[in-house]
């Protein structure tokens, strides 16, 4: 998710929530029909540890499937009972939804914060796990019990414009957050939330051919850093642009 407002922070809760709910119903249809936010494995390498109060919209998803397998992904809080994540995290190779999904919120260490079980798992109907490049890699989880917003649990803000490139975005503080692998080889994992300064760009050579209204390219500001390596591997960590 990209935002150009000072949202998902521990102040101005009422303003932030008013903005969120004001656009939620209309924006939901757009989300489920178009965005492609995830790929195969969490990966933020050469980043640094983040506190949950600087990214209180972050959620960690643990999903289980009928065949006994499991998956884990980063996700974003988008409402009191709604979590936004990658479809590939909650469907199996046969495109069957997980039998269970739990969201952990309010803590930078995965599976330590408040746990909330999903009573509905809603992957985009057009998503095909055997064809990632087809897009539509997005899912919503409806929580059985509502979240209580605190300085450590907040909804992420929606973008105020579809324009994610150009002067407006380039003047903002751009970061990406997530759990998972922390080296480019994908062999070292961390239990703690990571962050990375990035630049939203349409000029990333390995991504230019894929860039459209549903895919956002980012590159790490520090040499040898990023959220992917060779092939897309970012499992729904949300980019955030702070004005």
Image (cartoon, rainbow, N blue to C red):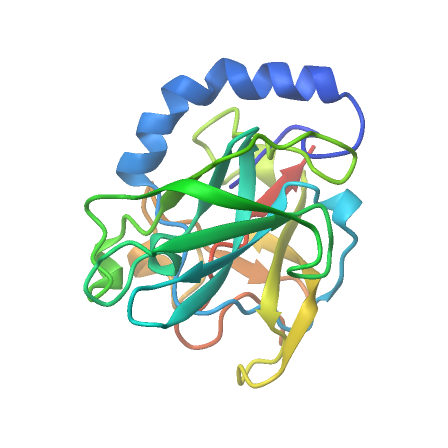
Residue at (76, 57) in percent of width and height: 50
Residue at (44, 59) in percent of width and height: 63
Examine the rendering and report whether any part of residue 20 can be seen. Answer: yes
Q: Splitting the image into 4 quarters, where does residue 79 fall?
A: top right
- Indicate the position of residue 94 as horizontal and vertical percent values: 19, 64
- Indicate the position of residue 52 as horizontal and vertical percent values: 75, 49
In the rendered picture of this protein, how many numbered marks are placed on residues? 0
- Indicate the position of residue 123 as horizontal and vertical percent values: 30, 46
Front-most of 225 and 42? 42
Front-most of 114 and 2? 114
Reply above or below: 142 against 113. Answer: above
Q: Is residue 237 toward the left or the right of residue 148 in the image?
A: left
- Indicate the position of residue 27 as horizontal and vertical percent values: 40, 24
Residue at (28, 64) in percent of width and height: 92
Reply above or below: 238 against 172. Answer: below
Reply above or below: 207 against 148. Answer: below
Examine the rendering and report whether any part of residue 234 can be seen. Answer: no
Q: Is residue 89 toward the left or the right of residue 227 in the image?
A: left
Query: Where is the C terminus found, in terms of image quarters?
Result: top right
């Amino acid at each position: 998710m990209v935002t150009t407002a000072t949202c998902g922070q521990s102040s101005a809760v009422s303003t932030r929530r008013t903005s969120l709910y004001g656009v939620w119903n209309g924006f939901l249809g757009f989300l489920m029909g178009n965005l492609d936010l995830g790929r195969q494995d969490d990966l933020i390498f050469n980043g640094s540890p983040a506190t949950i109060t600087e990214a209180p919209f972050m959620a960690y998803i643990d999903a289980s499937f009928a065949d006994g397998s499991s998956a884990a992904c980063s996700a974003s809080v988008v409402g009191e009972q709604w979590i936004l994540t990658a479809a590939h995290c909650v469907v199996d190779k046969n495109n069957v939804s997980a039998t269970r999904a739990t969201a952990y919120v309010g803590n930078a260490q995965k599976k330590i914060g408040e746990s909330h079980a999903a009573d509905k798992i809603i992957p985009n109907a057009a998503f095909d796990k055997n064809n990632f490049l087809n897009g539509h890699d997005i899912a919503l989880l409806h929580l059985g019990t509502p979240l209580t917003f605190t300085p450590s649990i907040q909804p992420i803000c929606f973008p105020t414009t579809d324009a994610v490139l150009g002067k407006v975005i380039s003047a903002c503080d751009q970061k990406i957050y997530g759990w998972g692998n922390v080296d480019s080889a994908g062999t070292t994992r961390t239990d703690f939330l990571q962050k990375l300064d990035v630049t939203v760009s349409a000029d990333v050579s390995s991504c230019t051919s894929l860039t459209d209204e549903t895919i956002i390219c980012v590159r790490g500001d520090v040499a040898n850093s990023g959220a992917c390596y060779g092939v897309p591997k970012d499992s729904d960590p949300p980019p955030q642009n702070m004005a």
